[in-house]
Amino acid sequence: MLLRSVAAVLLPFALASAVHAAEPKPVHGIAMHGDVKYGPEFTHFDYVNPDAPKGGTVRLGTIGSFDSLNPFIVKGQSAAGLGQIYDTLMTSSADEPFTEYGVLAESIRVPDDRSWVEFTLRPEAKFHDGEPVKVEDVIWSFNTLLEKGTPFYRFYYGSVAEVSQTGERSVRFDFKPGENRELPLILGQLVVLPKHYWADKEFDKTTLDAPLGSGPYKIASVDPGRSISYERVDDYWGEDIAVNKGMNNFDRIVYEYYRDTTVALEAFKAGAFDYRAENSSKAWASEYDVPAVRNGLLIKDEIHHHRTAGMQGFAYNTRRDIFKDKRVREALAYAFDFEWSNDNLFYGQYHRTRSYFDNSELAATGLPEGDELALLEPYRDQLPEEVFTEEYNPPSSTGPGGLRGNLREAGKLLTDAGWVVKDRKRVNAETGEPLTFEVLLVSPLFERIVLPFAQNLERLGIEITVRTVDSAQYIRRLDTYDFDMVVGNFGQSSSPGNEQREFWGTAAKDQEGGRNLMGIADPVIDALIEKVIAAPDRKALVAATNALDRVLQWGFWMIPQWHATYDRIAYWDMFGRPDIVPDSGNVFSAWWVDPAKYETLQKKRKNSGG
């Protein structure tokens, strides 16, 4: 009895000691897998110039229009650059797969099983009105974005069970059961909004009043639909923290809006704005032969990177009956002649995309084996046999029979799916309904790409229409899935995770404003997404992503298009930039206006009359 009594007395102390010993310590950064690159005493990222001069104005061009300064809701079309007025709890480095370091948070605590995360705010963090950033702001921001923000937030933060204050400057997020090792980093990306500012305002309404933020810039002026200017905050609280050293160097950033890319390019070459990321291979090859380029005043540069290419392609809306049959989706891909397009339209600048995670180890190649095969085996009866027996590659016109052979294969698939040719038109064998659909575009640049595709489809008896609309109408039609086919673009990080739910998850299929453009609703894909999210280490993440990619490939949800392994940028010779380019590519926020170059440029422009 005595021994039992002593044990009963000592047991609570032993348990308390064990719990105390297991308590995670606060750290300055967190990596998705493995260790962080930068230690607790780091002063700046390697890919910046910590001594970069501050000053100058940079003018940027963007397309379309805007009618709102609230980027967090479905309603309205928000202005460019609004992210610069806000701070997040943490921020990612550009030279690691997925690692975050503190911004508003001075430290982070996470247990080994990552079942919760706690952030401690920096005491010096404040909003632009001088009010400190408080835990109540973090909690209010999280709840408000979840309740009133775009569907993105509900999918991104969907595994959070509870948020609570744990100290004067500490806030904790507890997670729902299940493996979700990325979630602490996802919460680190939370934009913290000022609760006191929004107290008498409707968050879910559009606004053209400049909102209050805490970031390195604030809104200086707004000309609705035409331009927006930001000015660097003179007493920005976070200017000297390590993640901001060498960044945010421009005193003023101005975004000018243009009707379309053709007008914008001509304005850029005339000196109306200073920096341009070029997305058109045709323009890059043929539209920059101007005196300013030949004289070295306007610089063309190709900056190579090692980031995941993601997927761009013609996206089917499988909510439409004509695209529900996978055989139809597979067939139409045979009519897109990438090789001809690359030679005749793109000046040979692109690689064919074949994976949703191209240009990385995350792309599924060859046949599944090892850990990836083990993940796929439980679903063998629910998957196409090709997932296990063939490597997916999009049709190529360089193979036997060329495009003609591809169209023969397409015809067989369409006939098998019940679409036959009558009077040179492809019609439903039972109803006589013609196979026709619309390709919805927002940029006239894509018309020259879609029209040859349409001509090839016409040889199959399929008639399509191509419709280009303004950006506001385009966004609205995407938000409500009011389209047959669009050009979908799904950028990917080197460490995919919770965002995959919104890209391909069943729960996102009918959410207005969501990203599941194709309307995918597949339990196997849902299960593999959760495997990606729960991956405990890099090896497991690669295997799970390979498996997800392979199943997506064989679903024929998109007709893959192309990608480049470098960033095409053009700029007037007025900038300085760091010597090191991180794996993710060009970081324009680390550039600066070089005063000597700027003066020289102005003199040469004046002398040349331009």
Image: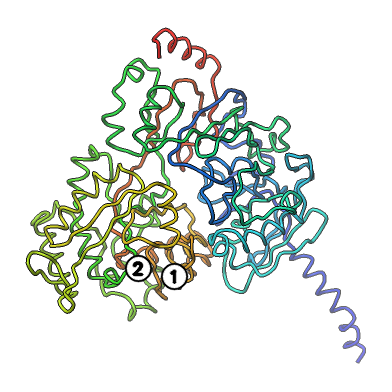
Q: Position of residue 363 (x, y in %)?
A: 36, 57
Does 311 sit left or right of 254 as displayed? Answer: left
Please give the residue where the numbered disc 1 appears in the rendered image.
528
Point 86% across, 83% down: residue: 7
- Sequence-wise, the earlier of marks 2 and 1 is 1
Q: Quadrant of the N terminus?
A: bottom right
The amino acid pointed to by label 1 is Leu
Element under disc 2: helix
Q: Position of residue 595 (x, y in %)?
A: 56, 17
Please give the residue where the numbered disc 2 appears in the rendered image.
551
Q: Residues within 10 Å of mark 2 (few under 14, many from 20)?
A: many
Does 271 sit left or right of 114 as displayed? Answer: left
Residue at the extreme right of the image, as rendered: 2
Real-space Cα distance between discs 2 and 1?
Answer: 9 Å
Does 312 sit left or right of 333 as displayed? Answer: right
Q: Position of residue 159 (x, y in %)?
A: 60, 68
Looking at the rendering, which quadrant does residue 297 occupy? top left
Q: Compared with residue 490, is residue 534 higher up or lower down, i.e. above or below? A: below
